[in-house]
Each structure stands twice: as structure tokens, then as C-alpha cells.
Amino acid sequence: MTTTLLPAPSRPVQRPAQQRRTPHDQRHFVLSLVSMAAVILASLSLNGVIQGWLWLPSVALTVGSVFTGMAVARRLHFPDPLIFVTGLLVLIGTVNWQYFSAQSILGAIPGPEFPERLTFLLKDAEDTVVSQLAPVLPGVGILLIISATTGLMAVLMDTLAITLRMPAVSGIILLVILIPPAIIKPDGVGIPAFVAAVTGYLLLLAAGQWREKPRKTASTGRTSAGFFTRAVSIGAVALTTALVLPLMIPGFNSGAFPQGSRLNAWGTTTGLNPSVTLGNDLRNPTSFGRITYATNADEPLYLRSSTLEDFSGQRWEPDQRLDSRRTGIRAMGGNNRTGSPIVTTITTGSFTSPWLLAPYAPTSITNVEGMWTWDPQNLTILASDGGSTAQQTYQVRSSTPELTRELLAGIGPVPGGEVSPDFMTLPDDIPAAVETTARALTAETVNPFYKAMAIQNYLRGEEFTYSLEAPVEGGYDGTSMGVIERFLDVKAGYCVQFAGTMAVMARLVGIPSRVAVGYVPGAPTGNTIRGPDGEELTEFAVDSRDAHAWPELYFRDVGWVKFEPTPGRGVVPDYAQPQPRPSEVLAEDNLTPQDLPLSGAQPPSTPDAAPVPSDGQTDRSRLGQIGVLTAGTLLLLALITVTPFLRREARSSRRRRLLTSGTHNPARMAWAETTEIASDYGYPMVPADTPRTFAERLRSKAALEGQAAVSLSRLQHAYEIEEFAQTTGSPRQAAGTLHTWEDVQTVISALHRTAKPTTRLKAQLLPYSLRHPFQSDRTLGYRRPAAGFKEALTGGQPESKSGG
């Protein structure tokens, strides 16, 4: 009799697999293109973290290859796990082809020399990160890191948005891409980059909705409501984090993730930016990267890292001159070799840089680990094996001539050919005001020394002030020669602008010049140590607050001479001190009025001790560490909070795919999804329930009416047929005529609509079904109903096997 009560099985119309899949394949391909565009748009925020746009083609190639490879695998109907693996393989092959082609087999398969090359590039990236401030130079190591991580984000984006059908959740990937720029850039991500990332996310949501639309009816409301709810939830969490995090972590005081709160993936190592942009490179107010040096010199020493010689372009950076560098730093030749020998022992601590610190001019360096080369033109020392200065103690012997005012004043102009033209070249965009000022200051003399003194005295005069804030407030905290023009107008700035201005003016009046980057002498520690020859050396300490830039000018037969145009910083050498002379002596000594001290008090010539930080400054580094720990804790809590939501979404997505593929019992899948979501909204199923009693209780307590009540009845009836009438035909065929998943979405939408806001939030973030599994499909690995449940469904009667 059972069989006579059941509807006759109907065989659904079979269509070729290619005909059924083609529309979905096309929609997947469109979503792949949109996902690729979203990742690239979000990656535009890296501009400002990395200088220029040279990194963008590499990132676009990597991301495009990943999405193309996964789209092809999906078009060939690869299983979902194999699509993910394909994306990883394409990522490895693309990155390998770009950065390891010489160490690869067929240009794409890593070869035996791959690990050595990878170690070298990672070390190069580490040195760049710890020794430069944003924007860092686009070295090969940095490009490798950016391409690989962005490509990995592309693999995860494709998996979430297309394979798992969770485009709203995949917005987390875009947020991850935005985090490094938000932390590193002083003013946060910035409006243009943020708008680009949001545009990509909205396009992704629209494409995801368009893909799902044909599979849903207008009456369910699931397409728009589901995506909208998830998008708003994620957006609310992100916005709340962005607003609350700065209030909770000390040091967050400007922008989204402002300056002073930079994080370093390689630890707490620090360095000195070897290049400057006339911007914020050498003015960090916090104290980090302590370095000590002990010397037998009569006065504290400047520690020199690198020199800047090319004043064109947006960024002044050292010319490494790799083709002319020399090995063997234990015996360095060159100019400036007369004078008393000086012995200095330097302990770098956490200071990390490929440029070795040394007082000028070094003649020998011993006890330093690694392979180093030196440049005969500027005597800078650079690592040749990817090494760095971190955690080293080494000895430097140096020697400079005894410089006096009389010696320098008796030196004439530099003849052509004595110095490389690199030290005289100027860009074409020199502002007229800069050149006019330089000519006016030096118009009454042809003597190089007095020209240099006129420029230095002008910049150290009472009209100019040292300020870390004036460039920002005045709007000239940027790059290029226009900054120098604005600086001369405002007459306030910091060391980079003073040093850069003097170096440019010196070249304008015929004196070769360059800018040295390093540290001012610092402050004595009160300790003495034994030198390599047993003599006592006085110890000094410097840190990031002592980072400095100063000009060096070239004089015939003497070499490079240091000047100090920055008021209130460093030490003015004795030969560069302004000295008044009677006016009747001016003509005889070729002096000019510019060499006389300007009106008002001259800045003190004694060394400026490092400023004693206030209580707040003393604790700033400690608070920064606490802030990092707090941020990590908050991030961990956020991940813990969102994990149940992602697990719930993944389970629903998998059931939907299995149900629509026809490979599993659809009614059982649909009933399991319905009962579990109902339990999330506060209507759990109990062991004594039959499908009918549960449906009646849910319909009553949740006030389901109209289409929702009809859909629930259809789901209940289909499940009973599929579960207990399997002898009459295929259960898949019996339930196949119903729009099963649409009914599930109709019921879920009704539950969501009638629930309280707190219940909705709890259903999303703390799903009851994950903590109390009861009714689920065996193929998904969840528990089956308890023993005796089928008897309860049929009122305690055993199943009929024959239908009679």
C-alpha cells in the first residue's frame, strides 16, 4: 500500500554535461576577471610603501597568471581541491620564471641553486625593510616578496569567491592587502587607494550576485539579502576596528595606522635610510637602534653610512658604483691620508644596514664579519654578499688632515678633471630663486672656502630655525628642487633640507659637493674601553634621534671637507667657525662680508648633546611594544570571532554544491541545512522530533506564513519520501522536481527576517549547529540521528520493505 500513496517517479530530462555547464563556466570566468581586478585595485595601495610603479607589472603578471590558471582548471572541470593546487603551482611557476629563471629547469621549475638564490633575495628584502623608511626602493628582494604574497592572496580570493561561493567573505583578502600600507604609510592607506579597493569589492559583490541570480527566485530574497548582510557585517567590523584600534594602542595619532606605529616582520632590528626625499626620512622623534662607539679622537665623531651625489629625480640615493668598487677593507687606499691616526671601536647592536658605519676617512677595518667592498671615490663600505651590520663589533682606523681656516682659505678653485663630474651635475629644474640666492651670497669672492662659509653662515643665521614640523605645516614636506625653493622662503626645516640646500648652492658656484648620511656624534656614556692596542677609548652612544645629513665639499689637495649648516644640530668644525675680521683686512685676505658673523647670537659651537626625552618619550618604545601586543591580541580575537561564521558558510556552500550536482540525496541535504539553520536562530531539533512535529513547531514558534510555510512543508515531505520510501524508486528522482535549495533559502530568509537583532548576530557569529551537531549528512562527516529516530518518524512502526 505504501507504493500506491507515493507519486510516480519521474526521470528528469538529461542534458549533455557540456550544455549544462557552459553558462556557469562563463559566469565563473567573468567572476575570475572581476576578482583579478579587485586584487590589483587593492594592491595599488602599495604605492607609497614602494617607490614608484615598477612593482605593478610584476604584481599584475603574477595575479593575472594565477586567476587564468585557476579559471582554465575550472573550465576543464577539475575537482575543487585540484583547482586550489593548480593556483599554487601557477603561482610558484610564475614567481620562479620572474626571479629564478637562471636557477630553474625550463625557466619555471626550481633547480638545485634555487635555495641559495632565495636566501639571498630574502636577505636583500630584509635589509631593505630594516634600513629604509617608506617608500622603499623596489629591489629584487622586495619585488619577490610583493609578487609572491599578492599572488597567494589571489589564490585565496579565487578559492573563496568562486570555489566556495563566498564573494562577500573574500573581501577579507582585500583587507589583508590593505593592512601593510595602512601600517607603514604615515597617513594611512589614503583616499584614492581606499576608493580603489572598495570599488573592487563592490564589483566583486555585484559579479557574485549576478552569478547566483539565475539559481534563485525573486521570492526568496536570498541573493540580495545574503550578500548585503554579510557585506554590512564585514564592513561594520572593519570600520569599528579602524575607529577603536587607534584609541586603544599608544602611538596611533594620525591617519588610519599613523607614523610611529610601523611594524617590522623581521623583528626589532633597525637601520638608517641610505636615501632621502627631502621628506620625513631623518626625523623620527622616537629612540631606537642604539649604537655605541669608543674612540681615541680628541672630539666626538660623525659616523658616516653613505653619500648622496645625484640630486636629480624625486629621490636622492647613493650611487653604489658596483663596477668600480674594491675588495679588501683591511687596507683601504685613496685620498685624505695625512694626519693623526684615529682608532674607533663600533658596536652596532640591532642596527641593520648593508652600509657599514665608519668615521671619515677610514684606512682599515678589521673584525667585521661578511664580505665588504669600498668605493674609492667616497670611501663608503657596502656588503657584497647580502650581509648586514647587525650585531657586530669591529675596529676602524681612520685619518684626516689637520684642517685649519688658513689652510682652506689658501686653496683655489678645483681644476677641471680632478673630480668626477658626478659631483658637479645639477638637474635642469633648479628654481631661479635658489640660483639667485647662491649667486648673491658669493658674488664678492672667487675663493671656494669663503663661498662655502657664506652659504653656511647664511643657513645658520638667526633667520633660519631647525624644525621638524615646519615642512609639514608649510606644505613643502616632499621631493624635488621645489622643496629647496620653498625652504628658502619659509626658512625653517631640518637637516636634510639644510644639507641639501648647501650642497646644491655649492655646485651652483663651482664647488663639488655631496651629502653624507649617518649620525651626529651623540652623547658620552661615561664608560671607557680598551682599544686593540691597549689604549683607553672614550665611549659614546647614538640612536635614531641622532640620524643626520650634512654636506661635504671638495677642496684641492685636501679632499672632502665636512660643513655643518643645520642650526642646533651636530658640531661646527673649528675651521668653519665664523670669525670677525677688521674691514681693512678684507681685501688682503680675500674675505667677504658674508664671512662675518651675522647679526644676533651665533648658534653654539659646542657639541649638542642628544636631547633628554621627556617621560612620555622615554616610555614610547615600551608603549609601542605593548601596542603591538595589543594589536596582535585584537587580531587573534577577531580571527576567533569570524572562524565560526566562515565554517558555517563553508558547510552551507558545500551542501549547496552537492545538492545541485545531483551526486547526493538532495532532500536529506536540504533538510539538514534547514534544521541546522533553524537551531542557529533558536529552534533546535530534539531527538524525539519527527520531521512533521519539528516542522509544525517551527512554523508556529517562528510565525512562518505564506511562501515560507509552503517551502517548509515541501522540504518536510521531500525528506520523508527520500528517507523512508527508497524501494519505490530513486529518492533523488522523487525529490528532483522540487526547487529544493530555493525552499531552504525561503525558510532561512523568513527566520532571519523575524528574528531579533541579537539573535541574528548570534546566529552569524556563534552558530548553535556547530556546537550541537544533530542532523547532518554522513558524507560531510557529521553525526547521524540517534538510534530509533526513524521509528519515531513513523510513529514507532518499522519501515516497510515491500510496500505491502
Image: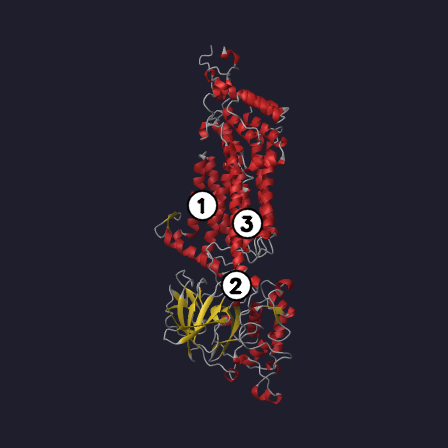
Give the residue type that dot 3 points to. Leu
Residue 737 lies, in percent from the top left, at 54, 21
The residue sitting at 64% across, 74% down in the picture is: 463
Closest to the observer, 293 or 113: 293
Mark 1 lies on residue: 91
Q: Nearer the viewer, mark 3 or mark 1?
A: 3
Residue 342 lies, in percent from the top left, at 42, 76
Give the residue type that dot 1 points to. Leu
Give the residue type that dot 2 points to. Ser
Mark 3 lies on residue: 178
Mark 2 lies on residue: 287
Instruction: Please report contact status of discs 3 and 2: CB closer than 8 Å, yes or no.
Output: no
The residue sitting at 37% across, 51% down in the picture is: 114
Q: CA distance from mark 3 to mark 1?
A: 21 Å
Residue 771 seen in the figure: yes
What number of labels is visible?
Answer: 3
Residue 325 seen in the figure: no
Left or right position of 717 against 336: right
Residue 29 lies, in percent from the top left, at 52, 38
Closest to the observer, 696 or 358: 696
What SS does tag 1 mark?
helix
Question: What colour scheme has been applied to the protein in the rendered image?
Answer: secondary structure
From this view, report whether residue 20 is shown above or below residue 133: above
